[in-house]
Amino acid sequence: MKMVNLKYFVPVVAVWVSACAASHNGDYEVLHAGQLRGIMHKNDISAKVAIDSLLERPGLFAVGALDALSGEVMIEDGVPFVSKAKDGVVAVSKDREVAATLLVYTYVSEWEEVQLPDSVVSLKDMEFFLSLLRGAEGSVKPLPFRLKGQPAFVKFHIIRPSTGHATHEEIRAAAFSDTLEEAKISIVGFYSDRHQGVFTHHDSNIHMHVINEERSKVGHVDDIRLGGNVKLYVPAE
């Protein structure tokens, strides 16, 4: 992995990122299967892609929801982690024989580290910083990223099946929610300001999933508090 050293956030980081924006619109493609608006407005929770069909090519990174809203899936460098929650108990497996109703994914062979400024602490800070890294406003290309380290906390949920035509609020209410505090974690995420209702929610430009070091919990990130023990990685040139 390469490393890009950044010390200050605004305005120095903005100037630096503006000069280097092209380096983070590199030779990768972000793809998706299914759409959030289809789940929320049409109750379309059918299978859109078989996970094993994507694993033959190396370097797969992905996040999404299983068909029938039966759980979450996160793929890190070709290794799938499938999480389901029932009766307050979380089960994580490496099951390849599952399908997703929503999946955003990319293939990346090498990542470079970008030092996070001390001022990037909250989820909103992170979103703004990633917008600078992604580059010019005219760019429609989403930015894949990874986080590794020990944040103060990560709040996450694991989606669970709900009956009938459930609203977003009902789907979230049915989900299992938990918090990882001072835990060593890895996150796979995607930033885009052009895919709200597709693979990010209407009020967010980020879709992230987290896994803890013990590989016992995997879920969709709802909130995060970073601190100085977290490293950010983006696709290398």
Image (tube, grey):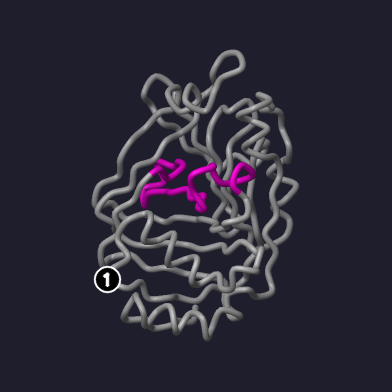
Q: Residue at x 71, y 28 (%)?
A: 46
User: In this rendering, would 214 be left or right of 51?
Assistant: left
Name the residue rendered at 50%, 52% in the picture: 206
Residue at 24% from the left image edge and 52% from the top image edge: 182
Query: Which quadrant of the structure image shows residue 10?
Result: bottom left
Q: Position of residue 160 (x, y in %)?
A: 50, 25
Q: Is residue 84 left or right of residue 35?
A: left
User: Toward the viewer: 117 or 103?
Assistant: 117
User: Can you say whether 218 is above or below 20 in the image?
Assistant: above
Residue 38: x and y in percent read: 68, 32
Which residue in the structure is indicated by mark 1? Answer: 118
The range drawn in magenta is 196-222
Tell me if 117 is positioned left or right of 37 in this view: left
The single residue placed furthest to the top in the displayed view is 164
220, above or below 150, in the image: above
Q: Nearer the viewer, residue 82 or 128?
A: 128
**Mark count:** 1
- Give the quarter of the figure containing the C terminus: bottom right
Percent position of residue 76, x then y: 54, 56
Is residue 30 shown above or below 222?
below
Corner quadrant of residue 48: top right
State yes or no: residue 197 in magenta.
yes
The secondary element bearing badge 1 is classed as loop
Disc 1 crowd rating (10 Å Cα; few below 14, some 14-19, many 20+) is few
Q: Position of residue 33 (x, y in %)?
A: 71, 44
Towards the viewer: 199 or 147: 199
Q: Which residue occupies 37% across, 54% down?
A: 123
Q: Amino acid at mark 1?
A: Asp
Q: Quadrant of residue 101?
A: top right
